[in-house]
Image (tube, helix red, strand yellow):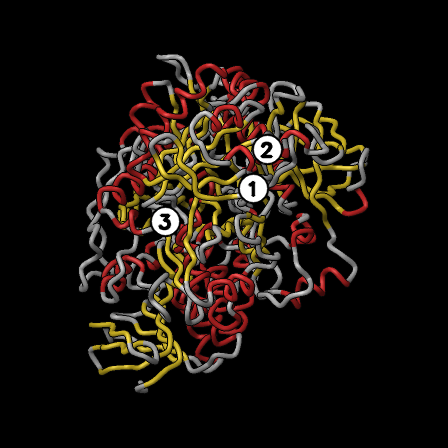
Amino acid sequence: MKSHYRVVVIGGGVVGASVLYHLAKMGWTDVALVERSVLTAGSSWHAAGGIHALNADPNIAQLQAYTIDLLSEIEEESGQNIGLHMTGGLTMAGTPDRWEWLQSAYRTFQSIGIEDCRLVSVEEAVALNPIMSGDGLLGGMWADREGYIDTTGTVHAYATAAKKRGATVIEHNRVLELNQTLQGWDVVTEKGTISSEHVVNAGGLWAKQVGRMAGIELPVSPLNHHYLISDSIPALEELDFEVPMTVDLEGFTYLRQDQKGVLLGIYEIDHQHWNMDGAPWDYGFELQQEDPDRIEKELIMGFERYPALQDVGVKTWVNGAFTFSPDGNPLVGPVPGKRGYWSACAVMAGFLQGGGVGKSLAEWMIHGEPEADVYGMDVARYGVWAENKQYIKETTGQFYSRRFVMTYPNEQLPAGRPLKTAPAYSDMTAAGCQWGQSWDMEVPLYFAPQGFEETPSLKRSNAFDIVAAECKGVREGVGLLDISGFSRFEVTGENAEAWLNHVMASRLPSPGRARLAPMLGEDGRLKGDLTVFNWGDGTWWIMGSYYLRTWHMRWFDDHMIDGVTVRDLGDEMAGFSLSGPKSKAVIEKLTDGSVGDLPFMGCGDFDIGMLRCKVGRLSVTGEMGYEIHCRMGDHITLRKTLLAAGADEGMIEYGFNALLSLRLEKSFGIWSAEFTQGYTPGMTGMDRWIDWDKTFVGKDAALAERDGNGPAQLQVTLEVDADGADASGYEPIWKDGEKVGFVTSGGYGHTVGKSLAMALVNADCAGEGSALTVHIVGVERDARVVAASPYDPAGKAMRG
């Protein structure tokens, strides 16, 4: 062991070993893995080892596919047998809704490039897995690239391949302390202190403690997970092939072959947390006592689905812990506020996602950005509110218990809610507001009659007419929307303008004006679809998506210069927007200033009734509108003031479901759908806001796209011949039987009376009038490219 390494990876499970391997593979060989016991002494040794390429997030699906391809490479490179069995896999549905969902999911997988799957009948599924009963099943999906590996062998393969490339593995050496230095970190271990530029927390079951060593409270918790291994099954002994990995969604079980028996795993409803503050340091190869009474219902369903189990014994019980995050996805990347500290934790499916996690983290450390859009597993998708132990307990437990439970797009899950609420939350609830969640905050979805309950559905829900009425109220009169769930960053200092000019690709607004501002990474891909306000007194605001607050602040901090202060106002400011042709009449009743004379995209400070507010003349609805920002404590009064002024104008309150419909009719994109860090300005149309005459982050890459052959795919608006269901995202788009793109978001345009979708399609299919088809809830529908902004294409309404 040396006294200095460039990177110290803490944790000798599959994730830590993969990170070490990828760092060495990409050229950083002065790296070491430090393990308190021996490799695999945690969750890795008792993991079931299943692998599959399917994931609803296309970026994570790509990383899983990468991992599967990598496995045979590290086996060859290391000379270590990993016990790879590529058996194929079945996912079975036993209810009409689930079968419909599975058919829809199949099309989504096609859309994101997973071509080696197909729908199968119950009869075909039973032929593929002869020990499975088809009773109560309606159909399934087959995937070629599913199977399992030997977990211990795989970890050693990663580590051996890393060592062959120059990396170091240090076992039997627990990390005791982490101390941040000007150069990086001092890693205090049982065998001495190591200085390093970077530390990677791949602690697995000990990730919580390794985080606390650096003053970090990671939102992770271990939960116990059961599986059993059966004695040999005569029916399997007679087969000349291995049965496939099989998931019975309604039975909460997964199964794979294990020699001539099977491994049956259970995601039980009655979940059980284990050592939420982290595993004991002397824990490693132990297991918890099996608890068959707690999983009795799921066991019964499993033995009914696979009747052969009823005639053989259980050879082995495994009840071991795995670490989960609130949404079940990994926590990967640079931890905000702790330079040089990297997270590689909560990788529940370590053998499936570990290769992709290692690749992305190594790229991030070495090149500054990962190749893939990994926001879905970025540690910065959570804020400090997620450090709360009760929040972690509720959300991780909810994810575990719902692992095989169907979740609908319009379903609101209860765990960890409500957390943060705007001050007028109670008054709005009394007015019928139905709430959703954005990051830590409750945001309005729509306003419904007392006693209304929305029915979860893959199709148009029973809230459809309610949302239609809200859209009509905005288009024809004036609507009031709580916009506390927008992010607001204040930028001040002598170099504020210079800094903004560097990080924003657009021209900056003049005093008293606002401007849309794309922000790019060094690779020219998007980092934000933001709005910059110049308040005229040396103070600037950046506004964007509320749930990106930590993510964007990390980006700002990483690109900070002297003479600039950026302050997150998310816990200080709230507000409402007025939208609709009568919005000017309402706001002019409340001030004797010139607010009604504000030009489109103008902004300033105004008295609104008794309150001093910041006002911007803009709206995402495509109508004349005003965004009114107030202190958090003024929120209740501002709502009452606006409602009173709007009573004679027929003002309605509305929510974000209506806003999403209204913005689709204007072809306005949103982050995480039309705009992501996987897309470029040219693909999405954001290039029209770029100021090419200045220097900004990502300019060289953006110029290369502009001056090259152009993007292969372009953002378009589609009109869809839908029937009772609308596109939502990632549905495949076809032309003459060839896949030419996918939906980024969709819904119903209540004003134009049409089902609409925004989509990325091949450039040669992007012309207006192009005839296409798109799968909506698994059913192919005709669609056509239409001109942008189906409603008010000239933009006269919003400009007034």
Q: Is residue 116 above or below residue 658?
A: below
Q: Is residue 205 above or below residue 782?
A: below
Q: Few, some or many C-alpha atoms within 10 Å of disc 2 (few <14, some 14-19, many ≥20)? A: many
Q: Secondary structure at mark 2?
A: helix
Q: Secondary structure at mark 3?
A: loop
Q: Disc 1 designates what residue?
A: 670
Q: Is residue 635 left or right of residue 704?
A: left
Looking at the image, can residue 513 be seen? yes
Q: Quadrant of the C terminus?
A: top right
Identify which amino acid the numbered label 3 is placed on.
Leu
Residues at marks 3 and 2 touching, judged by CB atoms closer than 8 Å? no
Q: CA distance from mark 1 to mark 2?
A: 9 Å
Indicate the position of residue 448 as horizontal and vertical percent values.
42, 16
Identify which amino acid the numbered label 2 is placed on.
Arg
Q: CA distance from mark 3 to mark 2?
A: 25 Å
The residue at 40%/45% (across/down) is 261
Q: Nearer the viewer, residue 525 or 476?
A: 476
Q: Secondary structure at mark 1?
A: loop
State the mark number for residue 569.
Answer: 3
Q: Disc 2 designates what residue?
A: 663
